[in-house]
């Protein structure tokens, strides 16, 4: 059975409990059905959209009688009230207005056209939107190619029809045409009910939702429980970001399945006691799961909604939409998944009376014009039984009309022709897709993956769905080999060895510039050698750790070189961090000593057993002067020796030390040479804090390739003229800058012409490239401390002036491989999101003193040479078709703020360290490219929590970029999921208005609007910044609000205004600027808003 059949059987099984569907008395204002209400609202929002036009296009060969055809169309319109219904609105209430049969004549346009002109004529007819308040929801176009060859376009609006209405509509049309040819009126049996009777019956059937015993209340309770916690938006492999205001443009393609696959799917249905609909439902859910949509897959499914036999022969919009939630958790086999799907679908079918619109209102998901609520992908299945349009003396052939609109992101519409003695049967799927999200090639690949998947589950239905192959051999080679063809010969030497080679080549070249004072390679080397001898005298040697707390200066660079020359690793200490954090880093790393200077001595923590050497202290200066200035005779440093230890945020509340060897440094230099036009005469800006591993990239670019390192003074490390003037004065050619800083440069500031600017470690806005990309060479970067600073680059220059909607992070660096894998470590296709893994010579040795964490994050590389490792980044990414990567955010609770990776657990640990806090949670609140941390705190006992004091407490323990922007005290314990984990989605949304002051109405307009909000939403109080939909509003409530605004203010706004403005304050701004608003139309005498100058019917 099909989904429609199953739903019908379920509905009819409890017919005894239902009120009888009969024709009866009608009120003066006929209500809309629930399904019609939703389409009415959509039509008001998208007035010019043809997304819900319902075309039937037929090629008719033979002597078509035009007059008989017109009369037949009028006969069918008279028979079915839905086809002669207009929709009127008064005070926010919408009602049906059924025209008398003798006044309702559907317009028929007669067009003569050559064969080549037909597609354009048909397309124009289908694209024209309906004005449902003034036009009949049916129009026809007769395209005459020759007197005996026509294309007939019948266009209906979906508010008056559905797919299951085609058969009675076309059957009645054929009956009427035969009668009119014979010169008589059609003699058909009267219909027992009309659509208006159904709309009234639907209200009686469902009852009052506020009555716990009503059908509506019982079914809505089921849907609230069933859809609790469902994802509000599926993560689909779209080619472009979702637009805020979709145009609903669409296209379609057909997917043909082999006969063997069709038969195999049928056998699966029979052997598992499921229907073919359930099988294709499971297949689509599995496909989306394998394409990165997760394990909780809500899909929309249309059902006929004709649970009463009286509706079988009626034209109307009866279809309802169910949200069917597929659970793919635990990697089930396909047969196990079918058992889950069967239970889910049957339960849904038994609760299918309540309309989808009411389910949306009850579940109350976050509203957005950008997407359909509760689901964005639909799956349907029906059995084709033959053509219904049979006209005497004519042959009629349906013409598939090109899909040009899309109601949803994806629609999988399966059509099955069942097997007979003379027909092997067939299965095909029409895949409709939103062209604002997907390219045609991407849709084709989705279809190919569905074909591969169905073949795989037929061949091995018991195997876990994760093992069903959706990747073609070519795609597998592409993502594993071709995109990772990055091998390159590099200088096999450590950082001090590379520096020594540049020193030998040009000892008098400038190595460092500090406040316009040049320092040559020879002078820098001599200073580094003296400091190295001093460090050696304190016991520093191979694999020692040296803390570096020297302010940005030539001595800072020399100290780093000194440690590296001795085979030690340097530990960068950013003195802007809290003292407790610095103390932990020194102790945890086992630092042999810390090198600093007198101006910052008070910020360097005292750690027992760890001496502090101040380079400018008199005693140290004397000691350095006494040391020989001959070249240091140090043992060669091996590539696998530690170069530095950098601490990053840790999930346990303590930072973790990453040990990075010298092996990746030479590849860093190769990356800069190959991708950043680095030359021996380049001038590299030293901008990054020493505690940020980008410092190593800057150091290596300059001193390992013969260039000069230009130290930026602290007063120029801000977005302004001081920085850009400094760059120009020093003729800097290469720099690595945070995107947020570059974006913040004032309009008068410019980057040096021809310079190379690497921007990364944060999400990069496209307008950055548009503003600066014409004069400077901007490169987007992605990197990790665990993979020697940088892993991918995207050069904007290679793409000319075209800036993509989402800026990619580019291709893997030389000697770097990137894999995008699913949770089972299987490569995913291009366009599909997965977790990013990085491999190659740049991988760090691991986490200092944490072997378990090292083995968890640095895992065996199954795709590389034997013994190779790959690093699990925890970042989500996807391949583009051209081999560039898109960064999609974090997989876990770690986030990036201004380029710093942050474990939320570390901030939570800081919050719970406050004596008044018993529990804490932290989330990242995203608004476009702005990311704010929000803390939640539960008091310990009966303590009162002061949010400002808690922020100050965290600020004393963590760097400022880890301090929550807002701390929200909670009255009860933290919400948990059923398996005992923190339910972050159940935490209250942050109230940012608490940061902006008084939210009470401040103007007369706001006062009046706040009263209307309270009235419509039945609330005692509403703030001027409160979101209408977050307070429980919905589309029909918005219509009522607009009706009250028209009455109260005499101004007409559109539904879109409510969606755009959302709040009292926003709508007040719109109303106060109402000089551009539309005037309210004058109601006609019967209450319908009809333009008297425009006829309703011809």
Image: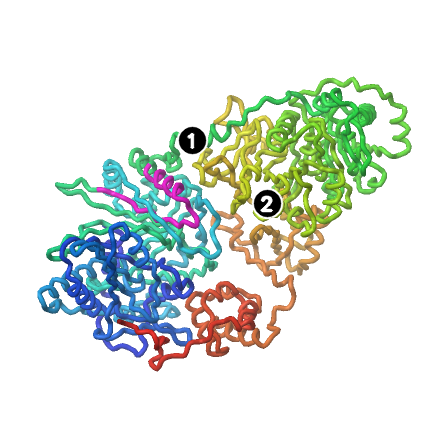
The answer to whether 81 appears left or right of 828 in the picture is left
Which residue is painted at 91% across and 33% down in the image? 618
Tell me if I can see residue 675 in this picture: yes
Q: Position of residue 933 (x, y in %)?
A: 61, 51
Q: Which residue is mark 1?
A: 476
Looking at the rendering, in which quadrant would you find the C terminus? bottom left
Which residue is painted at 64% across and 25% down in the image? 666
Q: Is residue 423 above or below residue 627?
A: below
Q: Position of residue 886 (x, y in %)?
A: 52, 41
- N-terminal label among 1 and 2: 1
The answer to whether 156 appears left or right of 695 in the picture is left
The answer to which of 768 and 203 lies nearer the viewer is 768
The answer to which of 938 and 395 lies nearer the viewer is 395
Q: Residues within 10 Å of mark 2 (few under 14, many from 20)?
A: many
Asked where in the image residue 658 lies, by quadrant, the reply is top right
Q: Residue furthest bottom?
A: 1085
The secondary element bearing badge 1 is classed as helix
Label 1 with label 2: CB-CB less than 8 Å? no
Give me the disc on residue 769.
2
Asked where in the image residue 582 lies, by quadrant, the reply is top right
């Amino acid at each position: 059975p099909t989904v429609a059949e199953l739903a019908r059987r379920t509905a009819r099984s409890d017919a005894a409990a239902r009120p009888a569907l009969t024709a009866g008395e009608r009120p003066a204002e006929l209500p809309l059905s629930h399904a019609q209400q939703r389409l009415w609202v959509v039509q008001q929002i998208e007035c010019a959209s043809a997304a819900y036009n319902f075309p039937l296009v037929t090629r008719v060969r033979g002597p078509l009688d035009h007059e008989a055809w017109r009369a037949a169309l009028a006969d069918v319109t008279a028979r079915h009230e839905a086809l002669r219904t207009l929709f009127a609105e008064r005070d926010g209430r919408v009602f049906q207005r059924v025209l008398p049969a003798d006044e309702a004549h559907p317009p028929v346009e007669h067009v003569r056209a050559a064969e080549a002109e037909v597609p354009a004529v048909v397309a124009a007819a289908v694209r024209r939107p309906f004005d449902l308040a003034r036009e009949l929801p049916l129009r026809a176009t007769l395209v005459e190619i020759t007197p005996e060859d026509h294309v007939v376009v019948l266009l209906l609006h979906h508010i008056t029809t559905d797919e299951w209405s085609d058969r009675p509509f076309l059957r009645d049309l054929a009956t009427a045409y035969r009668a009119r040819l014979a010169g008589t009126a059609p003699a058909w049996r009267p219909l027992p009910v009309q659509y208006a009777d159904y709309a009234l019956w639907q209200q009686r059937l469902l009852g009052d939702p506020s009555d716990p015993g009503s059908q509506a209340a019982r079914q809505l309770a089921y849907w609230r429980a069933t859809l609790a916690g469902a994802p509000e938006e599926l993560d689909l492999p779209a080619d472009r970001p979702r637009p805020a205001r979709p145009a609903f443009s669409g296209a379609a393609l057909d997917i043909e399945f082999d006969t063997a696959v069709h038969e195999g799917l049928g056998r699966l249905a029979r052997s598992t006691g499921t229907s073919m609909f359930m099988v294709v439902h499971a297949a689509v859910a599995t496909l989306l799961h394998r394409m990165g949509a997760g394990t909780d897959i809500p899909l929309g499914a249309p059902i006929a909604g004709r649970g009463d036999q009286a509706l079988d022969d009626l034209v109307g919009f009866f279809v309802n939409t169910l949200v069917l939630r597929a659970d793919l958790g635990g990697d089930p086999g396909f047969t196990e998944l079918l058992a889950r799907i069967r239970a889910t679908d049957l339960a849904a079918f038994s609760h299918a009376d309540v309309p989808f619109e009411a389910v949306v209102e009850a579940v109350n998901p976050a509203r957005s014009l950008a997407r359909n609520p509760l689901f964005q992908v639909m799956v349907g299945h029906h059995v084709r039984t033959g053509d219904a349009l049979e006209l005497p003396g004519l042959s009629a052939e349906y013409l598939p009309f090109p899909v040009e609109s899309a109601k949803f992101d994806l629609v999988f519409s399966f059509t099955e022709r069942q097997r007979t003695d003379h027909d092997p049967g067939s299965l095909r799927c029409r895949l409709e897709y939103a062209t604002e999200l997907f390219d045609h090639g991407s849709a084709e690949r989705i279809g190919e993956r569905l074909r591969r998947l169905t073949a795989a589950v037929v061949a091995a239905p018991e195997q876990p769905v994760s093992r069903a192959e959706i990747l073609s051999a070519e795609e597998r080679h592409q993502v594993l080999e071709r995109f990772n063809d990055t091998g390159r010969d590099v200088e096999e030497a450590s950082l001090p060895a590379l520096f020594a080679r540049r020193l030998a080549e040009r000892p008098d070249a400038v190595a460092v510039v500090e406040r316009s004072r040049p320092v040559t390679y020879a002078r820098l080397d001599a200073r580094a050698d003296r400091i190295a001898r001093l460090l050696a005298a304190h016991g520093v040697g191979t694999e020692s750790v040296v803390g570096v707390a020297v302010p940005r200066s030539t001595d800072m660079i020399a100290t780093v070189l000194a440690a590296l020359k001795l085979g030690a690793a340097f530990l960068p200490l950013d003195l802007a961090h809290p003292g407790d954090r610095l103390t932990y880093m020194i102790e945890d790393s086992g630092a042999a000593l810390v090198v600093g200077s007198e101006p910052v001595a008070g910020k360097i923590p005292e750690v027992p057993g760890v001496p502090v050497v101040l380079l400018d202290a008199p005693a140290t200066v004397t000691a350095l002067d006494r040391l020989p200035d001959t070249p240091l005779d140090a043992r060669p440093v091996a590539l696998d020796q530690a170069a530095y230890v950098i601490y990053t945020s840790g999930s346990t509340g303590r930072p973790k030390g990453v040990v990075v060897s010298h092996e990746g440094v030479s590849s860093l230099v190769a990356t800069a040479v190959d991708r950043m036009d680095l030359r021996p005469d380049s001038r590299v800006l030293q901008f990054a804090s020493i505690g940020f591993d980008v410092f190593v990239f800057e150091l290596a670019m300059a001193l390992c390739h013969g260039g000069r390192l230009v130290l930026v003074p602290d007063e120029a490390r801000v977005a302004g003229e001081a920085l850009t003037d400094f760059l120009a004065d020093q003729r800097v050619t290469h720099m690595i800058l945070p995107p947020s800083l570059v974006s913040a440069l004032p309009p008068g500031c410019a980057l040096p012409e021809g310079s190379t600017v690497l921007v990364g470690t944060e999400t990069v806005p496209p307008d950055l490239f548009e503003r600066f990309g014409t004069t400077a060479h901007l490169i987007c970067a992605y990197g990790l401390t665990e993979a020697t600073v940088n892993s991918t680059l995207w050069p904007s220059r290679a793409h000319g002036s075209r800036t993509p909607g989402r800026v990619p992070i580019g291709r893997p660096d030389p000697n770097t491989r990137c894999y995008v894998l699913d949770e089972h470590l299987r490569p995913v296709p291009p366009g599909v999101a997965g977790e990013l893994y990085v491999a190659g010579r740049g991988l760090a040795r691991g986490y200092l003193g944490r072997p378990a964490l090292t083995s968890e994050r640095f895992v065996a590389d199954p795709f590389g040479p034997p013994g190779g490792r790959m690093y699990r980044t925890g970042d989500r990414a996807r391949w583009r078709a051209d081999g560039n990567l898109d960064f999609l955010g974090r997989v876990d609770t770690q986030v990036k703020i201004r380029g710093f990776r942050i474990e939320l657990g570390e901030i939570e640990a800081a919050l719970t360290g406050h004596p008044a806090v018993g529990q804490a949670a932290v989330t990242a609140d995203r608004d476009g490219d702005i990311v704010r941390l929000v803390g939640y705190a539960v008091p310990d006992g009966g303590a009162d929590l002061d949010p400002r004091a808690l922020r100050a407490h965290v600020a004393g323990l963590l760097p400022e970029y880890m301090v929550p922007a807002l701390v929200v005290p909670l009255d009860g314990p933290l919400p948990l999921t059923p398996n005992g984990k923190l339910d972050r989605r159940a935490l209250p949304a942050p109230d940012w208005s608490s940061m902006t002051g008084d939210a009470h109405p401040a103007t007369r307009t706001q006062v009046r609007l706040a009263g209307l909000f309270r009235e419509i939403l039945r609330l005692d109080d509403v703030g001027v910044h409160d979101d209408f939909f977050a307070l429980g509003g919905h589309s029909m409530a918005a219509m009522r609000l607009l009706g009250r605004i028209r009455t109260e203010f005499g101004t007409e706004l559109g539904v879109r205004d409510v969606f755009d403005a959302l709040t009292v304050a926003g709508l007040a701004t719109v109303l106060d600027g109402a000089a551009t608003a539309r005037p309210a139309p004058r109601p006609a005498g019967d209450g319908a808003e009809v333009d008297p100058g425009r006829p309703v019917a011809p």
